[in-house]
Each structure stands twice: as C-alpha cells, then as structure tokens.
Image: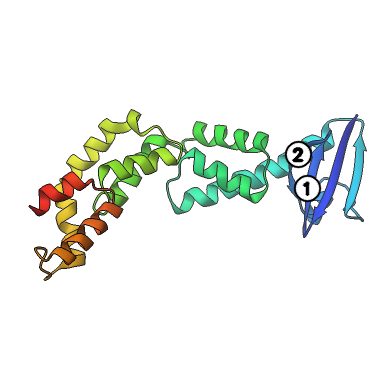
Amino acid sequence: MNTVRCKQKGKQYKIYVNDIYLGFLFKADFERIGLDAPKSEEEIFTFDSDNEVIAIRDIIYDRAYQKSIGYLATAEYPAGVIKNKLYMKGFSESIVDEVISVLYESKYLDDGRFVESYTRTYIRSKSRELIEREIQARGVDASQYRDMIDDVYADENVTEEDVIRGLLEKKYRNMDLDDIKIKRRAISFLSRHGFTYDKINNYLT
C-alpha cells in the first residue's frame, strides 16, 4: 500500500510518497490521473497499487524535464547548474538525478560543449585562470578539458596579452597609464577580470 501525502503551499501541492518528498503537483494534475484535488491544506491518499504513484511521478518528472529543456534552449549549462535550478523550483533529488541522466544520454547535456561555449563567451573579457575557476565552480572539472580550452584560444587566435590590451583600450582609452592613480585603477580593474599582478605588471611595464 502506498501513502501519498499532499501539503498545499500556494498553488502547489508538495507530494510525499511513503513520507519521501517527490516534487509538486497543481490542482489540474490530480484530474489528469483521475483523482479529486485535495480539499484541505493537507490530505492523504492511500493506494493498493503502484499505478497512481507511477502516474504522479511521471507528471513530476515530465515537468522537471521540460523545465530543463527550456533552460538548455537559452544557453549551454553544465549538470550542476541545471540541478540547482531544478532544486530551487522544488523538485526532489531522485527526480532531478533521473532527469540529468536522461539529458546526458540524449546529448542535451554535454560538459565538453559547455566548456567550449563558456570559454568562447568570456575569452576576451576574463583571464584563462578565471574562466577555469568559474567552470570548476559550475561543477565541471576544468582540468579534464584543458586541451579543449587550448584549442579555443588557438581557434580564436587570442592570447592573454591580447585580452589585457583589449580591456584597457575599452576602459582606459586615451588615458595616461603612467599616471600612478590611473595605473592603480587599471591594475584593480584587470585583477577583477582574473589577471594576476605579475601578468598585469609585465604588460604595463
């Protein structure tokens, strides 16, 4: 026997199957599986078979999957970011893990593709070290993709010196970088873009 507990929160009903959190449903979802919507803020259903629980899980899974596809339609994301987005929307770990697995299998998620896209996006505005740290912070081991990052830099024909030059030309065009105050501001500016003091100083001297 399965016990499904529904706890209302706003327009959503938090769903617990045998006291394990699964996700959420809306009133219309209950009608889809042939149930009357809960009439109170908390209601418990009991089922002799697994059919209703499977139907509930399918609805929650499908909603999480479609959310993920929507996110990935706008940009390349790694699994860690998609997971966090789904957790924030109220989906359970088991549902999220299942969605992530299917996304990898169907090639909607691809860590290498994310690394390439992220590097190309920020190659002219951030240091390589910062790009790799930010990739790492998104749950992808950047060290495994250093050859790919090398290829992006080669393909774009960009060096870190080029990036520093471009940032300075954009921010400090026609300013005297020999002026100590301006130079300090420029150093601070480039540091925020991930460049070490040594690299900055080597370029400015």
The N terminus sits in image quarter:
top right
Front-most of residues 190 and 125: 190
Say whether residue 51 is visible.
yes
Point out residue 196 in the picture as x, y percentages from the top left corner.
Answer: 23, 45
Front-most of residues 130 and 73: 130
Q: Quadrant of residue 187?
A: bottom left
Say whether residue 158 is visible.
no
User: What secondary structure is found at the residue carrying circle 1?
Assistant: strand
Whether residue 146 is situated above or below residue 43 in the rendered picture: above
Q: Residue at x 50, y 38 (%)?
A: 79
- Circle 1 is placed at which residue position? 14
Q: Is residue 151 left or right of residue 26?
A: left
Q: Quadrant of residue 55?
A: top right
- Circle 2 is placed at which residue position? 21
The disc placed on residue 40 is none
Tag 2 near tag 1, CB within 8 Å: yes
Q: Residue at x 31, y 45 (%)?
A: 130
Q: Amino acid at mark 2?
A: Tyr
Point out residue 120 in the picture as x, y percentages from the top left corner.
Answer: 29, 47
Point out residue 154 in the picture as x, y percentages from the top left corner.
Answer: 17, 40
